[in-house]
Image: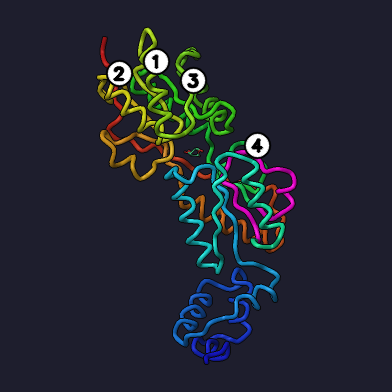
Amino acid sequence: MSNIREVALTAGVSVATVSRALTNPEKVSEESLKKVHDAIKAVGYTPNLLARNFRAAKSFAIVVLVPDITNPFFSQVIQAIEDRAQQKGYAVLLGDTRETSKREQEYVNRVETRLADGVIQLRPQSMSSSTQKIPWVNACGCEGTPGPSIRVDNIAATKAMVGYLTSLGHRRIGVISGLKDNPHSIDRLQGYKSGLTAAGIAFEKELVAEGDFTMWSGQNAAKQFFRLKQMPTAICSMNDEMALGATQALKAGGLRVPEDVSVTGFDDIPYAKYWEPGLTTMAQPAEEIGKLAMDTLLRVIEGEELSNLELVLPTEIVIRQSTCAPPAN
Ligand code: RIB
């Protein structure tokens, strides 16, 4: 049976490096980690992981709390976290909180009982106070979410999207929000209002339709606009899923997108490109967010004090076929 010495010999590193790669992978360079993993495969070594975990007093697992696992934006972030975690020798436990603190707490208990080493919170809400004592990182949060946090500037991004629509000539712009008390809805609504103000357009309450970030809610929200005396010529949706649902409802109601109503989203999920018409949207760097979240959590697990760390990543407007100038009349 192969042993750790054989692995070290095959990898061309010391026994101590192999041992560190198994117990503290974050302390080993990517290059050495790869050599060790290749050698483990080559010699057929099976590490005793339970003994390793016991020695290191770690579980080598982390929890990712996600508000809605069916949202493709979060799938992209989770995929990046998982890739990074695997490179670093960690397993990922997924907790779909469905926006409830009770479910969140059940997963947090795993860290408190050492079944996991830390948490990446993808909910924009701040964590409960008990949670803040364990190693955790917030990703996809909002302005004011306690750190360490990795996020985009939701206010500036939505303002920029409204700026793009006004630059096309739109003056009557509807918005589809998430649930009103969701921090993302609050920030993005603020951005929407600032975008209107910057273009000298007064805010009108009737142009806000509430959804809950799901596709069907976008469909329902768009139907509300049909009840108005005058339809908006553009709809700025607070995420892509709702924008896709809204496009369906507009088309079913006999309107053309974008000739009668332009529609924009937020996230740039993979479907946005393949939708008919292709969705103009505000792209968030999902992969980068996930990767940085995992790297940051590993630093916190290692004892670094990063509560003031706030990484704000850039967003970018991706212009596709769902937007054009408003109809002339
Ligand atoms: O939680 C819902 C939305 O917030 C997602 O679609 C994404 O935009 C995230 O930031």
Q: Which residues are magenta?
A: 117-136
Residue, x 57% and y 39% (percent of image)?
99
Q: Amino acid at mark 1?
A: Arg
Of circles 1 and 3, the one toward us is 1
Rounded to the nearest angstrom, the CA distance separating label 2 from label 3 is 19 Å
Which colour scheme appears in the figure?
rainbow
Quick check: 200 above or below 81? Answer: above
Res 312 visible: no
Which of the two discs, 4 and 3, labels the residue nearer the N terminus? 4
Cα–Cα gap, marks 4 and 2: 36 Å
The amino acid on which the numbered mark 2 sits, given as a three-letter code, is Pro
Which disc number belongs to residue 172? 1
Q: Are marks 4 and 1 in contact (CB under 8 Å)?
A: no
How crowded is the residue under tag 3: few (<14 C-alpha within 10 Å), some, or many (20+)?
some
Q: Is residue 112 above or below residue 168?
A: below
Distance from disc 4 to disc 1, alpha carbons, whole Å, reads 31 Å
Q: Earlier in the sequence, mark 2 or mark 3?
A: 3
Q: CA distance from mark 2 to mark 1?
A: 9 Å
Q: Looking at the picture, how far across and down is residue 34, in whole percent?
A: 49, 75
Please tell me whether mark 2 sits on a helix, a strand or a loop: loop
Q: Mark 4, residues whose alpha carbon is within 10 Å: few (<14), some, or many (≥20)?
A: few
Q: Is residue 72 a member of the stretch shown in magenta? A: no
| Main secondary structure along the magenta-highlighted residues | loop
